[in-house]
Image: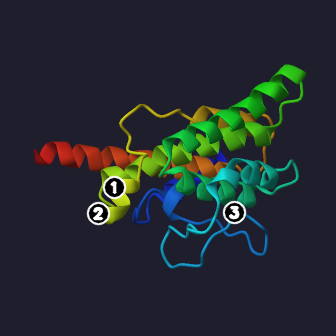
Amino acid sequence: MKYITLLLLATTTAFAGPPMICHPVQIGAAKSLPWKSVESWNGTDPAYNLASLSSDTLAILSPSAPINLRMETLRRAAIYTAKNQTLAAQMTAQLLARVADAETSGNPTPALWFDAGFFAETLRQASFIYRFDMLSPSEKAQWQLRGETTPLDGKPWIEKAIRMGGKGMESALIKIEEYRQADLKRTQKLLSAK
């Protein structure tokens, strides 16, 4: 597949944090969730009302939203929910409910499967931030996505979206494999050091 070739190219670069969290997706002038312009991966706006996160996210993920806007919006949503497991679970449930509703009505779309899968995988990668000390002590105390439970596996949902004809979604699979390989190597290294 095309994404395997891209994966081989991507893995030759140094791993600098979980890619679905640490690597912003360029969206140009498109409107996504509120975000501060910062040099690091975390540009959350402390003034943003998290009570609006789910409705704002779903409004941006309209059927016509391009794939890069979908990925960046879901990345931002996952970072916002990292301090609130209830909000993360609520957002996941809403994305899965959209898939279930579409399947029930006979109108599933690749974008719905992709959104649910990408968000699930981004939450999985958010636990990497905590587990490998990528936060300041005060940030770490607030970060609730810690990998203490088995997260949902969104990779098959993204693969399904691609099989359904979703375009431009292969880059998400590259980011998933890049993370999983780096996480495996890091875990093995930590275990061998004990």
**Among numbered discs 3 and 1, the one appearing first in the sequence:** 3
Judging by the rendered image, the residue that carries numbered circle 1 is 141
Provide the secondary structure element on which disc 3 rests.
loop
Q: Within 10 Å of the Cα at label 3, are there few (<14), some (14-19), or many (20+) other Cα atoms?
A: some
Q: Looking at the image, is 169 positioned above or below residue 100? A: below
Tell me which residue sits at (39%, 50%) in the image: 128
Amino acid type at mark 3: Leu
Tell me the number on the disc at residue 40: none
Quadrant assignment, res 23:
bottom right
Q: CA distance from mark 3 to mark 1?
A: 24 Å
**Residue at 41% from the left image edge and 53% from the top image edge:** 143
The quadrant in which residue 60 appears is: bottom right
- Residue appearing at x 49%, y 42% in the figure: 85
Is 46 on the left-hand or right-hand side of 192? Answer: right
Q: Amino acid at mark 1?
A: Ala
Q: Is residue 66 left or right of residue 76?
A: right
Image quarter (top left, top right, bottom left or bottom right) of the C terminus: top left
Which amino acid type is marked by label 2?
Pro
Residue 120 position in % (x across, y down): 57, 40
Badge 1 marks a residue whose secondary structure is helix
Residue 159 can be seen, yes or no: no
Number of residues whose C-alpha sits closer than 10 Å to that of mark 2, classed few (under 14), some (14–19) or many (20 or more): few
Q: Nearer the viewer, residue 129 or 163?
A: 129
> What whole-number distance in Å separates the C-alpha atoms at marks 1 and 2?
6 Å
- The residue drawn where x is 62% and y is 38% is 90
- Packing grade of label 1 (10 A; few <14, some 14-19, many >=20) is few
Of circles 3 and 1, the one toward us is 1
Left/right placement of residue 32 relative to residue 137 reads right
Q: Position of residue 1 (x, y in %)?
A: 64, 43
| Mark 2 secondary-structure assignment | helix
Residue where numbered disc 2 is placed: 137
Residue ID for mark 3:
33
